[in-house]
Structure formats: structure tokens, C-alpha cells
Amino acid sequence: MSPSIAASQPSTAGLSRALVTLLAFCCGAIVANIYYAQPIVALIAPDLGLSAEHASLIVSLTQLGYALGLLLLVPLADLVENRRLMVATAVLACISLVLAGTSSNGQGGLFLGYALLIGFSSVSVQMLIPLAAHLAPEQQRGRVVGNIMGGLLLGILLARPLASVVADHFGWRTVFIGAAGIMLAIILLLALTLPRRVPEHKASYAQLMASLAGLLRRYPVLRQRSLYQALMFAAFSLYWTAVPMALSGEHGLSQSQIAVFALVGAVGAVAAPLAGRLADAGHARRGSLLALVLAPLALLLGLSAPGFSVVGLALSGVLLDFAMQMNMVIGQREVYALDPASRGRLNALYMTSIFVGGAAGSALASPLYEQLGWHGVALVGAGLPLLALGIFVLRSRRG
């Protein structure tokens, strides 16, 4: 067997615990780049000359850039040696973070371009997860993906409190400069410890991109799971982009206090490993149903007076995070099982749809909160996973 083919075969011995932990850390640190700005847009926007209604564009464009990276870069994981590809994208992320952190006052348009580039270049995380799924044996795949997703989702959740605390004490620019320093460490870790994987797939980039439409047509599970999670992530992004505005504007919380609030939401990260185990045990459908019911209930709590208290909003955040993560991991495992040779492209399609939903949710946050307050955010947010639940139930009955 040639070295390149051997490198592309799944492992039968499984991944070591140390390597899984390392991959989880790298995933969390890389994906955090997309979320650092989320709780501090109210600090960034005035410096850059952006209005309150346009502040959430910073988050939305970062997520849109991520979606573009997923669509245009992640499929290359089925064509190019994976470690080299991930290191290259991490280098670009480091450069874009430095540019954002050195932006001058009044450069709102330029900063929005950097935000788009930060998202576009932070997609190596979605190359790491399919690589781990490829290396893990079938009977451990759900658990391995769940554990790595736990690190990724912990990075999402911890990015917000970390950014709030750093911005409160050292200014928002320090957040981006510090993130660039973390990316330098990630580049070294990836280069020195990641196994090589040369894909067996042989095609041009144009053929690879053209094959995406074929995969989408061929697999109804991919279409369904992409839609469910896009709606879930739209609600998740809407909530976490709007809630710092409510906490500072209506509850008078400082950035450091908002950081503590966001830290509470990290409790929901326990859903990822649990979801992986449920999927391995054959309970994927029940897990998805639980997640799709829990998400709208979590957001509707905010319509009551107790639910709009700081404690009530925190409870909504924990439940929403739990539901979103559970549905994402279950969907990811089902998508990966469709075609092992196309995992990079399948993951690109799945995650692109999710972050298009997330970008839409984030874009809605500022105008929705400015015009309709928290009740508008809660109602629209709850309606998104309710729509996913309705489609899920209808398809389950037909099936």
C-alpha cells in the first residue's frame, strides 16, 4: 500500500486521548475567532463610526465569511493534503486578526472587510473534525466527534466572556491582537502534531466544486439536517448577538458582568459528548426531537417577567446552547456516515448552511432589538426552531 493511500485509510486502533484533547483545543481556539466580537459590538461600533442598528453587521459578516470559507475552502480537504491546508488557513486567520486589532478610529467599512476575512480564514476547524472522524473507528466515531465538538462549542461559548473581560480592562483591540497570538500557537501545534492525510479523491478544483450539487441532490439526509441546524443556529446567533444589548441597555450590566453571564452559557457544552453517545446508541431521532422542542421553549421564557430577568435570560441561554449543540452533533454524525470519501465536501455543505442561518440571525439582532425590544427577539427566535420542529415531525410521520 502506498504511503498516500495508507494515510487516507481510517484508523482501526482509534485516536489517542491526547490527540483528541489536542484537536478539541485547536477547534475551540480557532472557532472562537468568529465569536470574540459578538458581546462587544457596542464598544467596537462607536469607535469605527457604525450606527447602533448596523452594529450587528460585524458579527453577521464574520459568520458570512465563515460560510464562504466553508463552501470554497473546506471541500479542498478531499483534494489537498489536510495538514498543509489547515496550517495555510490558520496563517491567514492570524494575519486578518492582526489587521482587525490595528484598525484606526472611523474605519468602519475597512473593519467589516476584516471581519469577513476573519470568518473566511477560520474554517480549518471544519477540516479537523472530518479528519478526526476519518481516523476514528466506526464504533467510536460518535464519541470522538462529540468530544471534539465539545471543545469546539466550548470555544464558542468561552470566546464571549473572554472578549468581554479583555475589552473591559484593556480595550477591544486587545481582543483581536490576543487572538492572533493564540493562532500563532495553533499553527505550531497543527504543524508539529497533526497526522498527515493525503485524500484518495482525484479531481480538479472545478470538478470538486461541481460535485457539491450532486451530493446535495443525492442525499436527502444532508438536505434535511442542514435545514434543521440552519434554523437552530439562526436562533442561537440571534439570541447571543442581542442579549448583550439587553443586558447592558436594560439591566445595566458592565462588560465584565456580561462575561460572567456568557460563562454560564458554557454549561450547555455538555450536550456535545452526550449527543455523540446517543447517536452511537441509535437514539439520534429522539435526541433531535428533544433538541428541537427545547430550543423554542428556551426562547419563549423571555416573554415573561421572570424570564427577562438576568437569571431567566441565563437559563434561556443554557437551554438554547444545549439544544443547538445536541442537534448539531447528531446531524454531523449522520452526515459523515453518508459517504466516507466525501466527508470534507459533505461537512462543507452542512456547515455552510448552518452559518448562512447564523449570519441571518445575527443580522436581524440589532434592528429587531432596536425596533421591537426583547419580545421581538424572543418571538422571532422561537419561531425558527419551531419551523424546524414542524418539518422534522412531518418527515418522521412520512418515514
Image: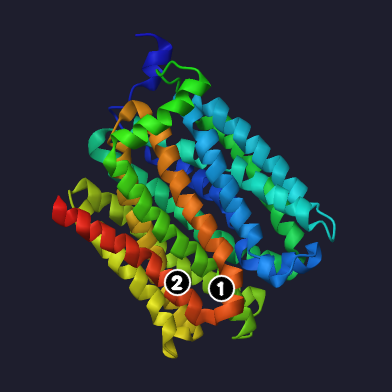
Residue 379's spot in the image, x, y percent? 43, 76
Residue visible at 45% across and 65% down? 235
Quick check: can you spot residue 331?
yes
Residue marked by disc 1 = 368
Q: Quadrant of residue 252?
A: bottom right
Relative horizontal placement of residue 237, taking residue 232 as reference (left or right): right
- Of 144 and 238, nearer the camera is 238
Q: Secondary structure at mark 2?
A: helix
Looking at the rendered image, the quarter that the N terminus falls into is: top left
Q: Secondary structure at mark 1?
A: helix
Relative horizontal placement of residue 236, taking residue 391 as reference (left or right): right
Please report contact status of discs 2 and 1: CB closer than 8 Å, yes or no.
Answer: yes
Residue 221's spot in the image, x, y percent? 28, 43
Relative horizontal placement of residue 50, taking residue 343 as reference (left or right): right
Residue marked by disc 2 = 380
- Of 153 and 343, nearer the camera is 343
Q: Quadrant of residue 192?
A: top right
**Disc 1 residue type (three-letter):** Leu
Query: Which one is earlier in the sequence, the residue at label 2 or at label 1?
Result: 1
**Disc 2 residue type (three-letter):** Val
For the residues marked 2 and 1, what is the alpha-carbon distance in whole angstroms? 9 Å
Residue visible at 67% across and 37% down? 92
Residue visible at 57% across and 49% down? 64
Label 1 Cα crowd, 10 Å radius (few <14 / some 14-19 / many 20+): some
- Of 48 and 275, nearer the camera is 48
Which residue is situated farthest in the bottom direction here? Answer: 305
Query: From the viewer's perspective, is residue 88 above or below residue 232?
Result: above
Label 2 Cα crowd, 10 Å radius (few <14 / some 14-19 / many 20+): many
Query: From the viewer's perspective, is residue 122 above or below residue 398?
Result: above
Quick check: can you spot residue 195?
no
Query: From the viewer's perspective, is residue 369 above or below residue 71?
Result: below
Residue visible at 28% across and 68% down? 293
